[in-house]
Image (cartoon, rainbow, N blue to C red):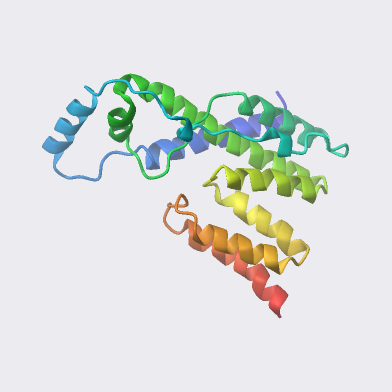
Amino acid sequence: MGIFTIGLVAVVGLTVLLNILIARGKSKQTDYGAISEDERLANQARRKDIGPEAFVKPDLTELPFDIQNQNAEAAEAAEAVKMAAALPMVRFDGDLTNNDLKYMYGVSNLDYITDMEENYRAFIAAMLGWAESLINAGEDAGAESVLNETLRLKSDFSKCYTLLADIYGSRGDTAALTALNARVGGAEYLSLPGMKRKIAAHIERYINVNDD
């Protein structure tokens, strides 16, 4: 297993842990009797089909697998993306708890859904690793297409946005930076506290430099 692959596994592991701690954390309610009753009812929910709107479908035709100048690290990262893309993925808007998902799709679907959510985040992590490898290889155009696909798939990894801003900033593309800033501002799925502010501050530094 290459160094990059080991690093990717570590990133995915941390990402999954963050997902568990934040998106699937315990209810903030203080009425523990109500929580227990909600859990009991959720565990009785019947299985329902997961609608196609929840599934994530990467567009591999838009990704730069044909770049000739990829170094070994970028080539390995590209293979990791292909492997991750082959797994079923889902993502849901909003801060859903385990009980929410049980009510929506049945308790018997919960493990399956959780696995597919983790597959989605592993895929985004693999894409981010590939983009970084392409940037290191001097292939900014390829990295840009990879990062744009993560945005289309509603990535909530802040680095997908800041790396894209770095690419736009390096070429002085104020219009692209402004459009990215507006996109971040309107992205309701970027819900972690301070995430939008952090990304916007990174983008605006480039805009302000270009305006000087």
Q: Residue furthest left?
A: 33
Q: Position of residue 197 (x, y in %)?
A: 49, 63
Q: Name the residue located 67 percent from the left edge and 31 percent from the top edge.
A: 81
Image spot of residue 137 (x, y percent): 82, 45
Relative side of 54 to 106, left or right: right
Foreground residue, 57 or 150? 57
Q: Nearer the viewer, residue 163 or 173?
A: 173
Given the current orientation, which residue lies at the most extreme right position?
68
The structure residue drawn at horizontal position 72% and vertical position 46%, both measured from the top left corner, is 145
* Quarter placement of the N terminus: top right
* Above or below: residue 97 compared with residue 194: above
Residue 149 occupies quadrant: top right
Question: In this picture, is 180 found above or below 41?
Answer: below
Q: Quadrant of the C terminus?
A: bottom right
Residue at the spot 64% in from the left edge and 34% down from the top edge: 7
Q: Quadrant of residue 51?
A: top left
Residue 23: where, in percent of width, then height?
Answer: 39, 41
